[in-house]
Image (cartoon, helix red, strand yellow):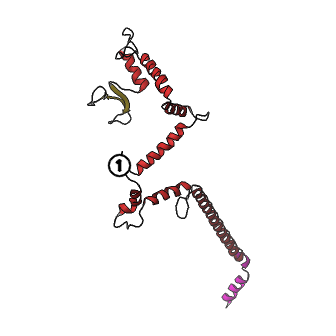
């Protein structure tokens, strides 16, 4: 009993406040850690939401619906309508897929008498020719670039009878004279053999007119070493009907 009385006295003298403060500090640190985790999760969710919104905006701006991945721009509708207009939807594709895909186009387009075949690529080519013809026939303006003006002038000169019959003929004679003349028709240009140089004429024809009367020369990659360039040449068709290759 004396031993029990001593322990009771020790317990009565124990400072319980210290134990309470320790437990309270642990709970505070746990609460702060939990709040930190929640804040981190909220930040991650916010970043993901911003990325998704930007991606959806970029998709919508490009004309693609983010939900169905279908183009909603006007040219997509036009192309879809053209494709549908060529199909024969009354045919089961499992029985005759060609008729299903091209039946209406075949029924509406006959092969012209001056052609051996006629297909969708022919229609596209003819459409592009009309667009090109309209662009080349338009009056020249200051907004046209140098290349455009040259192409338009060259095309329009073909419909100018005065230029075709007079100016173009004089221009051809002038260029023949620049190359030293043409002995085949002395009345047009007499060849002065004292000043005529074969190498000079050949060089001018090849470099100035992109014509290869005897042989062709070009630079390409070596088949054995792609990092090395080589000079290749072969005979021109004008020099030899059977083209033979010679690489150097």
Residue 44 counted in the magenta span: no
Residue range in magenta is 2-18
Considering the whole magenta stretch, tell me its main secondary structure. helix
Q: Is residue 175 visible?
A: yes
**Location of residue 172 with respect to 127 vertically, above or below:** above
**Location of residue 57 with respect to 189 vertically, above or below:** below
**Location of residue 82 with respect to 211 vertically, above or below:** below
- The part of the image, by quadrant, that contains residue 93 is bottom left
Give whichever of 32, 245 is nearer the camera.
245
On the image, the x and y values in percent for residue 238 come to 31, 27
Task: Report the quarter where the C terminus lies.
Answer: top left
Numbered disc total: 1
Name the outermost residue toward the bottom: 1
Give whichever of 124, 66 is nearer the camera.
124
Give whichever of 35, 248 is nearer the camera.
248
On the image, the x and y values in percent for residue 9 come to 72, 84
Give whichever of 36, 223 is nearer the camera.
223
On the image, the x and y values in percent for residue 156 come to 51, 32
Looking at the image, which residue is at 68% across and 75% down?
23
Looking at the image, which residue is at 41% across and 57% down?
108
Instruction: Determine crowd level at label 1: few under 14, some 14-19, many 20+ residues with C-alpha closer than 10 A.
Output: few
Name the outermost residue toward the left: 242
Looking at the image, which residue is at 46% across and 59% down?
85
Residue bearing mark 1: 117
């Amino acid at each position: 009993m004396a031993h029990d009385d001593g322990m009771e006295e020790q317990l009565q003298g124990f400072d319980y406040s210290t134990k309470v403060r320790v437990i309270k500090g642990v709970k505070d640190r746990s609460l702060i850690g939990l709040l930190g985790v929640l804040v981190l999760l909220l930040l991650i969710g916010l970043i993901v939401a911003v990325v998704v919104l930007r991606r959806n905006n970029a998709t919508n701006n490009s004309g693609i619906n983010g939900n169905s991945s279908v183009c909603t721009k006007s040219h997509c509708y036009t192309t879809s309508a053209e494709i549908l207009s060529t199909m024969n939807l009354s045919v089961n594709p499992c029985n005759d897929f060609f008729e299903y895909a091209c039946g209406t186009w075949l029924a509406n387009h006959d092969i012209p008498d001056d052609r051996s075949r006629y297909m969708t690529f022919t229609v596209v080519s003819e459409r592009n020719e009309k667009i090109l013809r309209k662009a080349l026939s338009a009056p020249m303006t200051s907004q046209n670039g140098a290349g455009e003006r040259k192409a338009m002038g060259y095309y329009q000169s073909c419909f100018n009878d005065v230029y075709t019959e007079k100016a173009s003929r004089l221009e051809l004679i002038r260029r023949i004279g620049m190359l030293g003349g043409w002995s085949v028709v002395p009345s047009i240009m007499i060849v002065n053999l004292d000043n005529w140089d074969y190498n000079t004429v050949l060089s001018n024809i090849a470099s100035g007119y992109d014509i290869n009367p005897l042989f062709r020369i070009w630079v390409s990659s070596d088949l054995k070493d792609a990092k090395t360039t080589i000079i290749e040449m072969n005979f021109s068709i004008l020099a030899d009907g059977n083209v033979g290759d010679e690489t150097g």
